[in-house]
Image: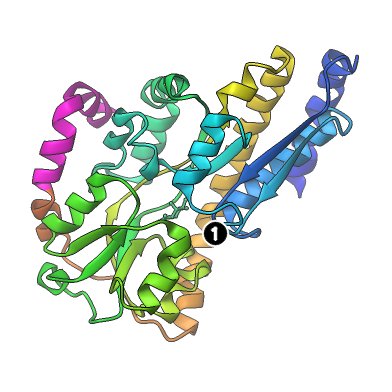
Amino acid sequence: MTILKRHIAVPAMALATMFGAGTASALDIKSSDVHPMGYPTTDAIQYMGELLNTWTSGRINIQIFHSMQLGGEKEALEQVQLGALEMTRVSVGVVGPIVEEFNAFNLPYFFRSTDHMHKVVDGEIGTDLLNKLEAGGLIGLGYMDAGSRSFYNNVRPINSLEDLSGLKLRVMQNPIFVEMVNALGGNGLPIAFNELYTAMQTGVVDGAENNPPSYESGKHYEVAGYYTLTEHLMVPEIFVFSKKVWDTLDPLDQQLIRKAAALAVERERELWAAREQASLKILEEQGIEVIREIDKTPFIEATEPVRAEFGGEFADLIARASAVE
Ligand code: GTR
């Protein structure tokens, strides 16, 4: 609450002077997210909307289409590219097929830590990649946290790499993740997030992989109760604006949106850390045995061919990102 007040109050006066003339037209930003309200990403975008509303005395607003109301993330990105939707918050996982350099962030066991990931995405590399999105019809507004992703399934607990053998596991819609699961001995199937619960319930897949908040919030534990913290991916979230719409905006409004977006990133990261712990607690209360101790070395070794194959295409970028301390 303190943060909300601080950020709304301080720039409000300065910005009102700059933008108070009210010459620019009203802007209603529709933004989609697969998560429900109350999730760190949706709460952060809501906060962004509150900031914009306050700074412009109600002229710019964000309406959030949450809980997969607009379907999966691939479709949302397409809508944003077309200009039918102004904004969406998705995983970097589904952005690789648009700008392939993003696959650097989608490589298994790539980032060394949250701190390493922050330094890479918040630095020159992250900014360069956001800029590359323009060619794909998207304006990259920022990266949010999504922790690490781990495997869950309804067949058996995963205590070692061998336990993944033959399991049909849903992955995000990007070939790199199919290859990753296959390299680990399972069967990777790309399925949209909005179809996942049913896919597990009906046995189309045995399980999937995600961070604790998504596993918990999506109630996936109800249909896949074995969860092991393999932490094989640290894929950040990203939120993007439609270039088609962006190009019609007053440059001062573009500036305001970028400023609010940066504050939304800060807000999400604060919320994320707490939510991860809260989700693990909920899972344990629900009787889910979360296997935390696992030797990751065989998983790291088994995924080396995936890093070599997909990383080979942008080796310089990978080397630059790896060198970030
Ligand atoms: C979540 C992420 C979503 C979505 C989902 C998935 O962690 O927040 O944006 O990508 O994973 O697995 O599809």
Residue found at x 49% / y 65%? 277
Count all numbered tags in the image, as a single digit.
1
Amino acid type at mark 1 = Ala
Residue found at x 57% / y 50%? 33
Q: Position of residue 44 (x, y in %)?
A: 64, 46
Q: Quadrant of residue 306?
A: top left
Q: Relative to 37, is 20 above or below? A: above
- Secondary structure of the residue carrying numbered label 1: helix
Residue found at x 82% / y 35%? 53
List the single residue furthest toward the bottom.
287
Residue found at x 33% / y 36%? 97
Q: Give the class, few, some or many, for how many residues have Cα within 10 Å of label 1's Cα (few <14, many ≥20).
A: few
Q: Main secondary structure of the magenta part?
A: helix
Residue marked by disc 1: 274
Q: Quadrant of residue 153?
A: bottom left
Q: Which residues are magenta?
A: 304-325
Q: Position of residue 177 (x, y in %)?
A: 25, 50
| Nearer to us in this view, 307 or 242 | 242
Residue 325 visible at all: no
Q: Position of residue 119 (x, y in %)?
A: 39, 32
